[in-house]
């Protein structure tokens, strides 16, 4: 009986430990400064359709003329497809074309951000995230 109880206790402890990173993983306000919305315009380097979060790479030229590659995290590949984006063909993003990202920069100062809205070269906007950073 003690042996069975030990296994149950161990399983419960494992579930609790696993739950902490899952909750932290979705706390985007911990990684990105949600109080400081920004816009970045530059040439699309590439779009990674990956799970759990796709990544958009944008070459942004700063006021000093120096180009920096920014990486913007966004939703998963499936959601991108339902919003009309594709890896190739119709609906795909064009590397080298000028796009604008509206979102939030990383708190640590690295050239990273959370993509909220993507503005296409023709001015069309696609919103990826409507949420409240506080989960409300």
Image (spheres, rainbow, N blue to C red):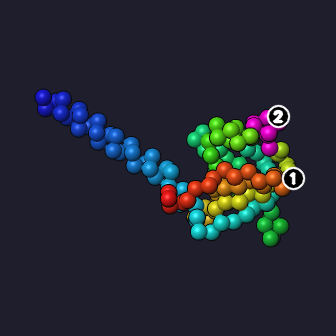
Q: Residue visible at 29% across and 42% down?
A: 13
Q: CA distance from mark 1 to mark 2?
A: 17 Å
Q: Which residue is mark 1?
A: 122
Secondary structure category for the residue under label 1: loop
User: What main secondary structure does the magenta stretch of the protein show?
Assistant: loop
Q: Earlier in the sequence, mark 1 or mark 2?
A: 2
Say few, some or many: other residues with alpha carbon within 10 Å of mark 2 (under 14 / 14 to 19 / 20 or more): few
Return the residue nearer the eye: 34 or 73: 34
Please give left or right for residue 83 compared with residue 107 in the image.
right
Location of residue 70 in the rendering, given as x and y in whole percent from the top left corner: 71, 56
Q: Residue visible at 69% across and 65% down?
A: 38
Please give left or right for residue 8 compared with residue 126 in the image.
left
Does residue 118 lie above or below 91 as drawn? below
Residue 124 magenta:
no
Does residue 37 lie above or below 88 as drawn? below
Q: Residue visible at 64% across and 37% down?
A: 78
Q: Do the CB atoms of the residues marked 1 and 2 lie less than 8 Å apart?
A: no
- Asked whether the viewer can see residue 135, the reply is yes
Range covered by the magenta-colored residues:
86-93
Secondary structure category for the residue under label 2: loop
Q: Which residue is mark 2?
A: 89
Please give left or right for residue 60 compared with residue 48 in the image.
right
Residue 87 magenta:
yes
Q: Residue visible at 12% across and 28% down?
A: 1
């Amino acid at each position: 009986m003690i042996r069975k109880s030990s296994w149950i206790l161990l399983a419960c402890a494992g579930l609790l430990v696993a739950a902490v990173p899952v909750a932290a993983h979705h706390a985007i306000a911990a990684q990105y400064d949600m109080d400081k919305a920004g816009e970045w315009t530059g040439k699309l380097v590439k779009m990674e359709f990956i799970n759990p979060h796709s990544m958009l790479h944008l070459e942004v030229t700063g006021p000093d003329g120096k180009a920096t590659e920014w990486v913007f995290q966004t939703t998963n590949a499936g959601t991108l497809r339902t919003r009309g984006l594709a890896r190739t063909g119709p609906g795909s993003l064009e590397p080298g074309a000028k796009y604008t990202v509206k979102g939030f920069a990383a708190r640590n100062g690295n050239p990273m951000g959370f993509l909220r809205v993507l503005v296409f070269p023709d001015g069309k906007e696609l919103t990826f995230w409507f949420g409240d950073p506080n989960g409300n």
